Amino acid sequence: MCGLSGEIRFDGTLADTTAVARMVEALVPRGPDGQGSWSSGPVAFGHRRLSVIDLSPHGSQPMVDSELGLTAVFNGCIYDYQELRAELEGHGYRFFSTSDTEVILKGYHHWGTDVVDHLHGMFVFVIHERDTGRVVLARDRLGIKPLYLSETPGRLRFASSLPALLRAGDVDTSIDPVALHHYLTWHAVVPAPRTILNGVRKLPPATVRVLEADGTSREHRYWNASYERHPEHASWSDRDWEDAIEEALRVAVRRRLVSDIPVGVLLSGGLDSSLIVGLLAQEGQTGLATYSIGFEAAGGREGDEFQYSDVIAERFGTDHHRIRVASDELVAALDHAIGAMAEPMVSHDVVAFDLLSERVSQSIRVVQSGQGADEVFAGYHWYPPLAGRGRDEAVDRYAAAFFDRDAADMARLVADRYTVDGDPSLEFVRQHMGMAGAQTAVDAGLRLDSEVMLVDDPVKRVDNMSMAWGLEARVPFLDHDLVELAAMCPPELKLADGGKGVLKAIGRRIIPPEVIDRPKGYFPVPAITHLEGKVLDLVRDALTGEAARERGLFRPEYVRDLLADPNGELTPLRGNKLWQLGLLELWLQTHGV
């Protein structure tokens, strides 16, 4: 787990190593254990390292293999690297390190861009070929690791975070009106390749991009899960599905124990993280470090779920850490959380993950986390209404349950200079759900959320906040073998028992029932869902200050109405509409946009 950056020139000039160095400096929190740089004519790479596998200098990056003529920077973890290494040794390759980075290098030399098909893990890597000048960029199947791009005539820059690209300079920081529409409509989700800024794009998940020395490029998507029923499963009973998914989850959790340092668990007290703890205990893990966070109540909402995490910690004898955060700590933490966001993220639990990651990183450097289970196993309330619907009706029901605003509300909110024709957010959902490869409307909704929403909300949130403190977060529910199996599973098994039915059935074999048979919980941060005091002052100042007035994103009368009743308008997901606007302005101002 690390932070990477670089520049590739196609105009005959040398890469700007000073600009790359500025990007590396911005990535220090993602890689507190070491720094490296490399350049060769028109190409320069920079890297910050978080040492998890091969702690020796042999695992440092950028990694140069002079024999093969390849140089790489890599962020992530390849869980099957030892098996791949043994396979490559059988093909005659010799290794100078014990790192997964070198396995990617050798694997690329042997399989070319098809190396991605062999990798189990979360990853972004960039490889330069000395003899051809070719550069290859790749991102993992579920988009767990990020890669941001800034392209201008004759040049491409890349980095693990958008703010790092801003630090390099020469970025078009004007607002992308379509991305703004997505942000304000789709609960801050901005699908790849867009970002809120016109001058920055992101490599989509499951994508390989090949850049030739003359600047020509091509890219392809190398993986898709099939959300259709397959003949080989036609005779499977409910129990067969449960057994197969349980085994796939066991493998996923076991894979994510690969490390040269201890691995803990972020334990929210919900089904997903509790299952991870239970499975690890059955794998023989003892003295497992687990971590939960809670806040003071506000606006009549509780701020912790310790009663559930305590049940799991006691049942499995974990080394459990309750982390309680006072309200007066929240404002200071907000500044750091917003600074750590690669893109503006409105979900109130961003600050929870930031504070949790800060405390956890003081005692451990690698954790497993339960993100992804709701999107993969149908845990959200908007999936049941899709059952039995035609695609057009399903799109409308999805938007009614998820979207923060409709077209009329957008017209009242967004200033004329940023308005767009039609409803690009609704049209994106309509096109995605209408694609082939999803048998039912529920399948189409699960595919949309797994390929888009999950990537640019929960997964991005966890990556940004954990890596801001040099903490590696692994997500077993996004093991691609598990995701493929779950995608083929009949949707009625996932919708059963109030959602995540098949997962709850597995849970009843492993964890206490009171953790399963409970109302669905969220990571509660009441001081953000209910704006008051210092947090409200922060939002008000951001939206009424000179920078916001000059930018002119929102109609002043709309902002005035929200400020007059700061908790009066909530989104269908119970988010605070004023917070959404304020967060965007705070993010832009924090990053100098």
Image (spheres, rainbow, N blue to C red):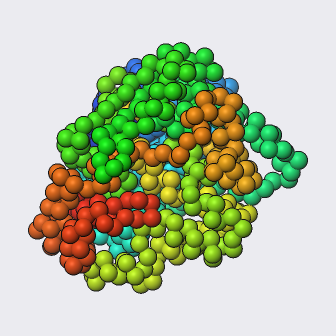
Res. 341 in view = no
Indicate the position of residue 536 as horizontal and vertical percent values: 20, 57
Res. 289 in view = yes
Picture residue at 41% right of the left edge, 62% below the top: 187
In the depicted view, which residue is nearer to us: 509 or 110?
Answer: 509
Identify the image quadrant of residue 473: top left
Residue 216 is left or right of residue 179, and the answer is right
Q: How many marks?
A: 0
Residue 567 is left or right of residue 546, and the answer is right
Indicate the position of residue 587 as horizontal and vertical percent values: 25, 57
Identify the image quadrant of residue 373: top right
Indicate the position of residue 269 as horizontal and vertical percent values: 49, 35
Specify the quadrant that holds the C terminus: bottom left
Specify the quadrant that holds the N terminus: top left
- The residue furthest right is 235
In the depicted view, which residue is nearer to us: 184 or 590?
Answer: 184
Picture residue at 35% right of the left edge, 57% below the top: 346
In the depicted view, which residue is nearer to us: 230 or 299?
Answer: 299
Answer above or below: position of 61 versus 236. Answer: above
Picture residue at 26% right of the left edge, 56% below the top: 531
Identify the image quadrant of residue 324: top left
Picture residue at 67% right of the left edge, 48% below the top: 497
Residue 328 is left or right of residue 264, and the answer is left
Indicate the position of residue 289 as horizontal and vertical percent values: 45, 22
Residue 509 is left or right of residue 253, and the answer is right
- The residue furthest left is 546
